[in-house]
Each structure stands twice: as structure tokens, then as C-alpha cells.
Image (cartoon, helix red, strand yellow):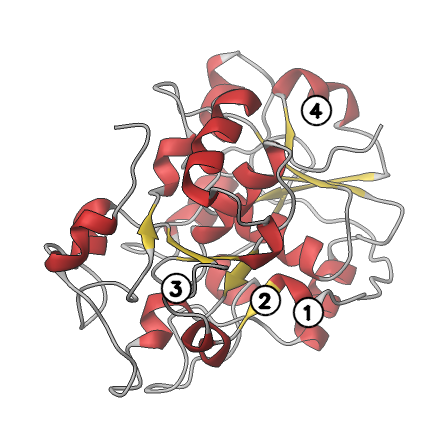
């Protein structure tokens, strides 16, 4: 059985020693970029390797041109995935301690490069530990394999492509940040507040229940159907602050059975590097749509 979106702790547990499975620990915080790695060394799911967001899963940042977490080159990702022992025969499972917000980056990157057998651990590290499941300290290594990228360019949208569809009713542009950041009332990270004109607001955290696990697929489907209306997934573009947590919405959409939407990978932090690109602030709040609130 191939896991393509989410996997439960019960389904992962029998495969900890399976050489055809790779587990990636993706814990990370912007406030302390090395904390996730320290936490990994102090305890992780047996056999897991550590994937650092900014060292392993982010490309070169060009001030004034790229966002905060630009996509890595295909060569960089192929080298990383190969070094972690991933090839076309491997099932990958990614987890974190933040509801899947970081693990979804690995899920999306692998899907973007044509690897379908990848899933996010529902509930992540907190749920694994709460159930009393085993863990290991220190570091873990695997023998490398050869990862061959098969890029899917239809999963990515550029800033110019976003600009071209602004306010086009045939498309949906979805902002995955909090409502306060969307409205421009609160911006803790980026130098400009607001959102891309015409975007709807769908905070990624609303994909989760009160225990930090994903809501049932039927609930997620209802949420996104209300957002998308009759617009098919291939004409939907998600973004966030830097292209990381928007992947959480893409994962939820896929888990709901609604297909693959597109990621504006540069997201808000790239959008605002060009002063000619339009922005909206609080007056656009009436366009927000937060069905779980």
C-alpha cells in the first residue's frame, strides 16, 4: 500500500526497520533555526533522518528578489534526497511537532519532483510520544540511493502567473496565513503587511482539530469546496508568507480528494520585493473566507 497524503502512527509503527521506508524529521522554528535539530538529537522516531528547512529544503536567497524560502534547485534536491536513501521504490514519511506545517514542505517538494509515495505523519511527534511509542537519541544515517527527479511544473506558479490571473473568476488565489496577517493588521515577519488583491483567506491551521491532527477528509472537502466553488484544483493557487505553510493547504486539499492545486512558491515575501505589484490591506477583509470560524 502506498501512502500519498497522510499516514497514522499505527500505520507507520510496523515499518520502522523497513529499508524501503524513509522517515524524515522536519521540526523547525523560525525563532530558533537550530532548535529542531537539537530536539531531533534528543529524541526522534527510530530510524528518522533530520531535514533542516533552511539548509536542506530551501534554495539560495537573493535579497530584494526572492522570498524567504525559495525553492531549491533540482540538483540540490536530487542530491539531498539521494543522500537520505530515497529512490522511486521508497515510501517517505515526514513529521514535525507543528501540525504538519514543516513536514508538508517535504511532501510537496517530493510530489513536485514526481515522487508519489510520500505522506505526512498525522499528529506528528507529539502524537507519537503521547501514545508512548519508541524513540531514539543521537543521529541516524542511511545508505544513499539515486533519486531521479521527474519535475511537475504544473504544480508551481510564478509571480507573473499570479499577476496574470488577479481577479479572474476562473481562478482562485488562496492566502494560507492567519486572518490578521491577511488583513494587514499584524505582520511579525515581513516588512510589508497585507495580501495579494483578490485572494481569499484560508488559514492552514484550520485544517487541524483541537488535538493538532488533520480534520476528517469529509470536513476538509467541505471546507475547500466552499472556498473553490466550481473552480477546479488546477486553477487554484495557494500562497503564504514564504511558500512553506501553504503546502499544508495543498496537502489537505489532496487528502480531501479534490486534486492538486498550485503553489506560488515565492509567496508574500517574494511578492512584496517588487513595488509595482499591487497589495491590499484591511479593506479587503470582506473578501476573506474562514469557514471553520
Q: Earlier in the sequence, mark 1 or mark 4?
A: 4
Q: Earlier in the sequence, mark 3 or mark 4?
A: 4
Dot 2 and dot 1 residues touching (CB under 8 Å): yes
The numbered dot on residue 153 is 1
Dot 2 and dot 3 residues touching (CB under 8 Å): no
110 is higher (above) or lower (below) than 45? below
Q: Earlier in the sequence, mark 2 or mark 4?
A: 4
- Residue beneath label 3, please? 242
- Residue beneath label 4, please? 12
Q: Earlier in the sequence, mark 3 or mark 1?
A: 1
Q: Earlier in the sequence, mark 2 or mark 3?
A: 2
Instruction: Tell me which residue sits at (32%, 87%) in the image.
Output: 64
Q: Residues within 10 Å of mark 2 (few under 14, many from 20)?
A: some
Whether residue 147 sits left or right of residue 62 in the image: it is: right
Instruction: Tell me which residue sits at (33%, 42%) in the image.
Output: 203
Q: Position of residue 141 (x, y in %)?
A: 72, 49
Q: CA distance from mark 3 to mark 1?
A: 19 Å
Dot 1 and dot 4 residues touching (CB under 8 Å): no
In front: label 2 or label 3: 2
SS for tag 4?
Answer: helix
In front: label 1 or label 4: 1
Whether residue 148 sits left or right of residue 56 in the image: it is: right
149 is higher (above) or lower (below) than 31? below
Amino acid at each position: 500500500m502506498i501512502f500519498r497524503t497522510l499516514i497514522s502512527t499505527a500505520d507507520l509503527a510496523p515499518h520502522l526497520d523497513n529499508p524501503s521506508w524513509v522517515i524524515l524529521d522536519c521540526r523547525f522554528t523560525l525563532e530558533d533555526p537550530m532548535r529542531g535539530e537539537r530536539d531531533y538529537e534528543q529524541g526522534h522516531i527510530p530510524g528518522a533522518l533530520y531535514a533542516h528547512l533552511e539548509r536542506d529544503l530551501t534554495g539560495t536567497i537573493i535579497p530584494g528578489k526572492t522570498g524567504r524560502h525559495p525553492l531549491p534547485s533540482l540538483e540540490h534536491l536530487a542530491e539531498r534526497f539521494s543522500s537520505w536513501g530515497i529512490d522511486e521504490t521508497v515510501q517517505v514519511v515526514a513529521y514535525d511537532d507543528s501540525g504538519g506545517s514543516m513536514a508538508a514542505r517535504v511532501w510537496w517538494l517530493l510530489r513536485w519532483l514526481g515522487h508519489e509515495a510520500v505522506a505526512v505523519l498525522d499528529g506528528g511527534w507529539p502524537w507519537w510520544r503521547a501514545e508512548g511509542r519508541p524513540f531514539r537519541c543521537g543521529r541516524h544515517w542511511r545508505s544513499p540511493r539515486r533519486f531521479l527527479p521527474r519535475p511537475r511544473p504544473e504544480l508551481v506558479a510564478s509571480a507573473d502567473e499570479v499577476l496574470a490571473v488577479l481577479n479572474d473568476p476562473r481562478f482562485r488565489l488562496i492566502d494560507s496565513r492567519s486572518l490578521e496577517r491577511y488583513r494587514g493588521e499584524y505582520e511579525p515577519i515581513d516588512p510589508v503587511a497585507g495580501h495579494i488583491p483578490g485572494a481569499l483567506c484560508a488559514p492552514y491551521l484550520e485544517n487541524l482539530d483541537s488535538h493538532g491532527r488533520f480534520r476528517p477528509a469529509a470536513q476538509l472537502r467541505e471546507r475547500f469546496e466552499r472556498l473553490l466553488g466550481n473552480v477546479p484544483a488546477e486553477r487554484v493557487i495557494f500562497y503564504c508568507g514564504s511558500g512553506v505553510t501553504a503546502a499544508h493547504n495543498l496537502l489537505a486539499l489532496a487528502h480531501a480528494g479534490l486534486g492538486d492545486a498550485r503553489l506560488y512558491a515565492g509567496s508574500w515575501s517574494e511578492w512584496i520585493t517588487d513595488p509595482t505589484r499591487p497589495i491590499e490591506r484591511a479593506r479587503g477583509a470582506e473578501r476573506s473566507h474562514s469557514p471553520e470560524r
